[in-house]
Image: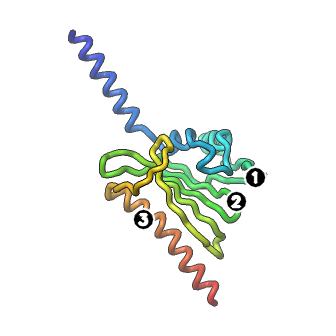
Amino acid sequence: MRRYVLSFVMALMTLTASADSLTIKTVFMEMPDSILPYLSRNNCLDFVDFVASGMKAQVDNELGGKSVMTALTDDSLSIQLNAVSKVDMLLLTTMKSEQIVAVVKTVGQESNVIESDVECFTTGWQPMTDWPELDALSQQRLDNTIKRLNILNYFVKILNKN
């Protein structure tokens, strides 16, 4: 009996550890093509392989252009899809301690930011119909990402007036 209890505890610890070790990389590699039609599943896998190998993470996208992964951490990534389109993905935590993915798509150029849009998904890539209540750190990370895009847009408008 003691052996079964010990086995159960070990299995539970393994499941807990694997749930805590979820990274944006593992979620990104499972992303369906419909989220970013620019990129195939192979493109996503290539990005991760190139970064792990210390190479420039550039792929030929589905529209015949080049896309570049510009950043990859345990909980975020950035991809320049083309000259005027970029995406940031953040692995965030809700108040219910559930992890979600925020996808921030930005369309425009440095000299003319047009629009940014934020969508939230479960880590299994199911769209979230209601905006999740994020924990304080996750809300701050999302706010900082959006703020960075708004600051860029503000300075672009000032430069275009001059």
In this view of the protein, which residue sits in the foreground, 23 or 84?
Answer: 84
Q: Residue at x 50, y 56 (%)?
A: 119
Pointer 3 with pointer 1, Cβ within 8 A: no
Classify 10 Å Cα crowding around label 1: few (below 14), some (14-19), many (20 and above). few
Pointer 2 with pointer 3, Cβ within 8 A: no
Gap in angstroms between the C-alphas marked 3 and 1: 31 Å
Pointer 1 with pointer 2, Cβ within 8 A: yes
Labels 1 and 2: the sequence-earlier one: 1
Gap in angstroms between the C-alphas marked 2 and 3: 24 Å
Q: Which amino acid is tagged 1?
A: Leu
Q: Which amino acid is tagged 2?
A: Asn
Direction from residue 129 to residue 33 in the image, left or right? right
What is the quadrant of the C terminus in the image? bottom right
Pinpoint residue 4: horizontal percent, then vertical percent: 26, 12
Direction from residue 48 to residue 94 in the image, left or right? left
| Residue positioned most to the top | 1
Pinpoint residue 135: horizontal percent, then vertical percent: 32, 55
Which residue is labeled 1 in the image? 63
Which residue is labeled 3 in the image? 143
Pinpoint residue 150: horizontal percent, then vertical percent: 51, 73
Which residue is labeled 2 in the image? 82
Labels 3 and 1: the sequence-earlier one: 1
